[in-house]
Amino acid sequence: MKMVLFHKNLEDLYEWAKTDYPGFWEDFTKYVEWFGKWHETFNWDLENYRFRWFAGGRTNLCYNCLDRHVRDGHEGRPAIVWWSEGAEQRRVITYGELHRRVSVMAGMLRALGVERGDRVGIYMSMVPEALMMMLAATRIGAVHVNFFSGFGVEALARRLIEVKPKVVVTADVAYRRGKAIPLKRILDEALITAGYKCTVLVNIRSNANDSELKEGRDMELHEAIEELGYPQESVQMESNEPAFINFTSGTTGRPKGIVHVHGGYQVGVMGATLMTCGMAPDDINLCLSDIGWIGGTSYAVYAPLMVGCTTVLYEGAIDHPDAGVLWRIVEREKVTLLWTSPTAIRIHIKHGPGPVKGHDLSSLRLVLCGGEVLTPPVRKWFEEHVLPEGALLVDHMGQTEAGCMLVTYPFGVTKEVRIKPGSCGFPLPGMEVRVVREDGRPVSTGEKGEMVLEKPIPSLTPTLWSDHARYVEEYWSKYKGRFRIGDLAFVDEEGYLHLLGRADETIKVSGHRIGAPELESVIAGLEEVAEAVVVGVPDPLKGEVPVAFVVLRDGYLPNAELERKIVAEVRRRFGAIAELRRVYFVGALPKTRTGKLMRSLVRAVVRGAELPDYSNIEDESVVEELKRVVSEKGVKTDVR
């Protein structure tokens, strides 16, 4: 499969999408193989908020990831290269081997009674067996559900209740920062908490033999494959049948099961990926996101395997046992596409440029950064200390619901695009993203507003698992006929879009909305600061006021002068309306095991509110430190 695609320039692509929206997306179907043609490209029932792409078309996600590459003679090409934490172990699995193993695993699932539409839960870290189970499930028309491997008992139990899987596949342990995390024991407790019974398959990785297999319920994964597995062909799936579910947090605390379908997901992800980075079969792709999140699902697994390139998996922390481990892998594998996040870059900033030095990173052509706002100071550090000559750091914005990026720099179409620090670029062709006011009217230049999607793209989730009413309420009710993305942004005078964070990340001071990431960017721009988080606390006069939690770079110590300097810099840049009520110096910020900042946890601690579930936190001691500094310093002391 050849990935030379754009016979039109960027302006023509925008015009094509504007004048023939269904036809524009239909053109990307040529990068997906179909068993049968669709009878209708796009149907949109606005009254019931239901849409269908390529209705009647028959395809299969697994087939497009494996079978066609083997058929075309690429069985010897590496599909997966896996590295253990610390780059101590390495496995290479070719497309031919992956195809054979997935086919037999699919037969095993059949033998266990898994039918079309049944759910298969996957509670594993970034290991090849997790990807194999994803592909095996979609191969037979089952729906895989990736549970983030950092979830604790309560979080996992709630998701088990939501989707009711027939089979859950796990491992006895996962490895993180040199420790064995007992996944099987956590799953056992979650099943008890949920009051739910299902078959459990366990990938035994440890020699400790401390994972009890429950008779009549549990089976060792490889024994089950040996006893029950047999080759299974890909099932022909109607384009709009579900392929997988990824969970994202809900505003009510109840997680949302985001559904993605076989046909539309493939077309949307392929289109966005090709327009953004021009991913090709000769690329070596490394995505640092866990498969429990859409970043890992789309860009560690499905996009690279659909294209037919090599995907590199890494299990563990990017700075353990030292901060050079990631760069050793990039150098060894000659990685060309690296998917990371601002949080991951800030981890490297804290360690300084030393661990990067001496590594040949010249293979990199694009580093794609998403998940949160990429601030200019973070970009500047990475470009100065990590990025090789000729490579680009590309900011992008997407979401679980879309399955792919929506706003970015389209370097897969043209290299003639100027990167503007602080901006994530432009909506891609075919992504009708707008920024609107509360009443739905478009904002003026520089005015803050909320992002919406005017029309469903093929990979947009068509519903929430078993709750379409909630889907309509959360996404379609506020801006009638438009999909609510939930991010705040503004568009500058040159048309660049600037993210301000999630709508729930804003602080409303005296009626004025201030984006917390804006303030964080200013604080992190100071030479003493490694990273910061800003949240709002209640104020009887102003409604809310901002406070900051700050982590200093190595070599700097907290003091009153630095505290005043931070407050003064924020005031200078944003005015008195944004003045910080308090600055707290801490050793670390609370993050998930994939490095995502747990802003709601910080907000709850400083407000003295009930803490949200933080079972997936990287380091629980951080919570106690937050509580201690807030208790010691309070929240109302003026630092001027």
Image: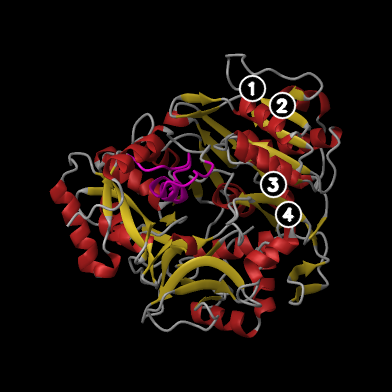
Q: Is mark 2 on a helix, strand or loop?
A: helix
4 or 3: tag closer to the N-terminus:
3
Q: What element carries label 3?
A: loop
- Could you tell me if residue 75 is visible in this image? no
Q: Quadrant of residue 512?
A: bottom left
Q: Residue 606 carries which label?
A: none
Q: Which amino acid does label 3 sit on?
A: Leu
Q: What element carries label 1?
A: loop
3 or 1: tag closer to the N-terminus:
3
Q: Which mark is residue 465?
A: 4
Disc 3 target residue: 66
Question: Mark 1, residues whose alpha carbon is within 10 Å: few (<14), some, or many (≥20)?
Answer: some
Q: Is residue 601 shown in magenta?
A: yes
Disc 2 target residue: 221
- Could you tell me if residue 556 is visible in this image? yes
Q: Nearer the viewer, mark 4 or mark 2?
A: 4
Q: Which amino acid does label 2 sit on?
A: Leu
Q: Name which residue lies at 76% across and 38% down.
A: 103
Tell me where the magenta segment starts and ends, as one range: 588-613
CB under 8 Å between discs 1 and 2: yes
Question: Mark 2, residues whose alpha carbon is within 10 Å: few (<14), some, or many (≥20)?
Answer: some
Which percent across, then down, holds residue 598? 45, 47
Q: Is residue 357 shown in magenta?
A: no
